[in-house]
Image (tube, rainbow, N blue to C red):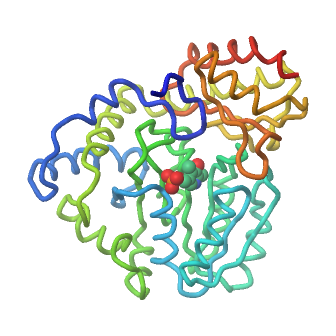
Amino acid sequence: MIDYKLHIPGPVDVSKGAYESLTKPVMGHRSPDFVDLYQKCQTLLQSLFMTDDPVFLSTSSAWGVMEGAVRNLSEKKVLCCMCGAFSDKWLDVSKRCGKPADALSVEWGSHIDPTELDSKLATGEYDLVTLVHNETSCGMMNPLEDIMNVLSRYPEVLSVIDTVSSFSVVSIPKDKWGIDVILTGSQKALALPPGLALFSVSERAFERAKTIEGRGYYFDFIEFLKNHEKGMTPSTPVIPLIHGLHYTLEKIFEEGVEHRHQRHAQLNQLVHDWVSAKGFELLPEKKFASKSLTCVKNNLDIDVAGFVKTLREEKKLSIDGGYGKIKGKTFRISNMGNESSESINYLLEQMDDILPRFQ
Ligand SMILES: *Cc1c(COP(=O)(O)O)cnc(C)c1O
């Protein structure tokens, strides 16, 4: 039995209300009741994604759609912007899908430089760019608006933007910025259990997809579109999570989207203040630090594994001890989902309480 609260950057803590919403009865996925639920979510989703394009629900984790986007949209070559664990893996995934792909790679913690992207695209080699907006592995948020400005000069290049850990944390106006595919997952900032991915596709991306062979079935964007027109998904979806999504969307609009963004910014600042008060540093440059989570550089050389374990066992709070190659050299604290100044302050106090033991 889990007896601790999640403060890791995904999955994040799920509220009691959200859990309860999952227990609503399952209906047939071709029934009018399902169509009604789908349409209700759709209206709210289009508003939250700031788009007139359809927003699809995929019963998969985000990776399904990340892989699907590559299979649907590229026939020439993919340019994978790489700046952390998730974005790095996308190059490998593209190649495994049989697509020629190149890297535009920077060190973990650094951002993707729009000027460098520009010179890569100027070669004319690419028809698709993959980008992770908020690199969860190193707590770095890319300058998405500037990057989209560059992309707007290359109409033949489509963009796939992973906003798995930034969606609903900061404003990402999909249509205004010209994003072709934007995707997110249920278990990060939306604070639902894992298992549902959400994504929206532009008109020109549909046009491209129609010309691409080997799209497969499960993640075929054209299948999603055909079913969407009937208020349905291609195959049987994870209906409990769609009930949960509807509950969550209503909560988000009750709080107010702007207010939600402000809350996340404030909570993130609380953690940053703690970091500097203790003499720690951030892994990314301050200007590109994520608003969803904080990736703390272990410049004080504490015993991160011991700190994280004791916090979980004694204080019943779970933070993350660093991802992949920066495990132990960093630790990460999420402020996504339903966190409040009370819950974040409580976490920081408990961290304060045990930190001296590990210094
Ligand atoms: C968590 C995460 C993913 C992977 O999501 P899954 O749901 O495990 O497929 C991808 N990208 C980013 C930025 C993430 O934070």
Left or right: 128 as drawn, with respect to 308: left
Q: How many marks?
A: 0
Residue 278, relative to residue 10: is it above or below? above
x and y percent of residue 105 in the render? Answer: 77, 66
Q: Quadrant of residue 122?
A: bottom right
Left or right: 98 as drawn, with respect to 21: right
x and y percent of residue 158 in the render? Answer: 55, 73
Q: Quadrant of residue 211?
A: bottom left
For image coordinates 23% across by 34% down, the residue present is 23
Question: Where's the N terminus, which quadrant?
Answer: top left
x and y percent of residue 205 in the render? Answer: 44, 74
x and y percent of residue 247 in the render? Answer: 30, 34
Left or right: 341 as drawn, with respect to 108: left
For image coordinates 39% across by 75% down, the residue present is 206
For image coordinates 60% across by 38% down, the residue present is 9
Q: Which of 245/52 is in front? A: 245
Q: Which of 273/260 is in front? A: 273
Q: Which of 51/184 is in front? A: 184
Left or right: 63 as drawn, with respect to 87: left
Q: Quadrant of residue 356?
A: top right
Question: Where's the C terminus, which quadrant?
Answer: top right
Of all residues, the one furthest to the left in this rendering is 32
For image coordinates 63% across by 24% down, the residue present is 312
